[in-house]
Image: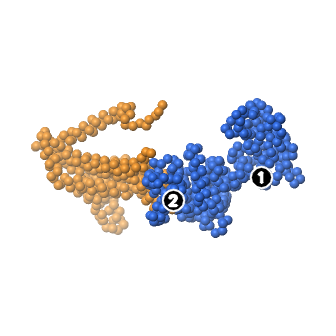
Amino acid sequence: MSDNTPIIDARGIDKFYDAHQALRNVSLTVGAGEFVALVGPSGCGKTSLLKILAGFEEASAGTLAIDGRSMIGVPSSQRPTRMVFQKLALFPHKTVGDNIAFPLKLARTDRAETDRRVREIMGLMHLSEAYRDRYPAQLSGGEQQRVALARSMISNPSVLLLDEPLSALDVKLKKSLQAEIKRLHRSVGTSFVHVTHDLEEAMMLADRICVMRAGRILQIGTPSDIYYRPSGTFVAGFIGETNLIAVDLERRGSAHAFANGAIRCAAPEIAAQQIADGLSPGRAALMIRPEMIALESAEQEAGECTMEGTVDEFFIKGASIQYRVAVNGIADPVIAEVQGTATPPADVGERVRLGFALADVFILATE
Amino acid sequence: MEVKPRSWRDRGLQAATLPLTAVLMVFFLVPLGLTAVLSFQSTRYYRLVWTWDLDTWVDVFTHVHYWSIMAQTMTMAAACVALCVALGLPVAYAMAHRVSTLEHHITVLIVFAFLTDAVLKTFGWVLFLDRTGVLNGALDAVGLGPAATDILFTPSATLLGMVYNLLPYTIFTIYLSLVRIDRDLVLAAYDAGASKTRTFLEVTLPLARPGIFAGGVLVFVLSLGVFLEPKVMGGGTSPMAAELIRQSFETRVNWPLGAALTLVVITIGAVTLGLAALVLMRLSGRREATR
């Protein structure tokens, strides 16, 4: 198998639950050792897709190959995939050691080898040897997560499927386990497919993110693609806060320019890679991330583009201060996130000028 | 305000259970005490004499006959438990996992059968199993000759009746423990590479064990007290403890003997329950031990 052969190759997958269609013509490839996150609002089909990969559900249409082998009609017990369940699904009647060793026991691995590998994986997951004879209920939430990961990884699967296993944890524990998962992914050559509704988590962990909505894949791309070059306003609005400003996109010779009465630019020309694929001139949305907008004082030199407005409200978020500025001619208040200072640079009701660089905008289709 | 989980030490809870405690004391513990007192008396010419001696107990412990009936009662109870679990488990499993759309209909059917008067059902079996009954009529019709079976009034018929009347106890207890098993645990076993059989043996069965145990104990204790089935279906061919006690009180008018035998059966039942509770506590305790 050559290096560019995908580990998972899913094509044209449909899934019906009675009359309800959960997946519509979904195609996804995952490379060897790649970390892909499936994100989207609840009911978008991400969990259905994961269940189809795991073999708990059969696709209604389409093909699926894992490790170059067709998975149609192959039960989950015969697949080179392992699942980490949302509620972990540790066997309450088995000790931690027996839980972790369960896949090896089923594969009839001899005792010495089993013992060696259980030791090894427990070491890798920072689980103390003393936990081996305890029962899952005697462990903390974080320790149980590690046991679940260890059980899934012990038989070196080609693909590890993670079904929001961190969603029930508190923020601090979540952060430490995210780091743990990232580290685990780096130290093994396994492909990870991670379902989550937490975008920050997806950005942190994944090599590629697959954004889903209503059974369709909207965009597959690197975290920076998804963040800075979203395929549409849904993806743009789903991942982090953003400004979407209605503009007219026009062609000027070989370049493009945008126009909005409220935005003044010296030369509003933008490069082709700043425009979503296949977008033609006409009504469009200009996306600019709040952290790319600066608050300018009268004496300070203006950015390439400027808008003027009145401060609606501001929030001190710690490292940054978020301003919501009402600008005449723009429907929603413009959000600007500026460097935090002890005294906020502007107060509610104050007139301010907002500036941004042309290189930071991205033009996409309105939906 | 801190809300504490209620325990039996809670004074309010103690007060609330007082009426029931009182009823139980008067109508359960007092008669039990009287039974114990009775076992130390004697009868002469069908009259109770307050002798306060151990004659009855000596009588009980020296008569092999009583103990052989006790042993037979135990054997029947054990066989009944084994059959009820063996038959109840697949029914409960099917109700929990295989027939989800019919689950409630089946439950209603079983409850109806369960709540129908046992005397009625037991006599129904007599009509069914009789030499000239429904079963033999049907067997004759398919060409197996008249009176092909003749199991009525045998110990087997007694066992059949007991299993029939007690089976719902195991079905429901096992069903309840099966539906409580998280479906993800079963999927996790498949995912780890286990076949369906292996998953059943490694995950489903161990997790259903408390239900199987509880059902088994219920059936065992109830089996110790059956008198209808041995009498109606067994036709006296399989004397059991309850019938022996009834005879001691009614036919032989030997109340002290009846009382002593009653205490023997109660002791056996209590010891069995105690042992079962211990095993159950060990089974579940080690998992739910606090951190």
In the image, B283: left or right of A328? left
**Which of disc 2 and disc 1 is earlier in sequence?**
2
Q: Nearer the viewer, residue B15 or A347?
A: A347
Residue A121 spot, x, y in % from top left? 52, 58
- What amino acid is labelled 1 in the image? Ala
Which chain is disc 2 placed on? A
Q: Position of residue A224 (x, y in %)?
A: 71, 51
Chain B visual colour: orange
Residue lying farthest left?
B45
Chain A, chosen colour in render: blue
| Mark seen at residue A164 | none
* Amino acid beneath label 2: Glu
Mark 1 nearby-residue class (10 Å; few <14, some 14–19, many ≥20): some
The residue indicated by pointer 2 is A120
- Name which residue lies at 63% across and 49% down: A201
Q: Quadrant of the N terminus of chain A?
A: bottom right
Mark in front: 1 vs 2: 2
User: Residue at point 74% right, 31% down?
Assistant: A347
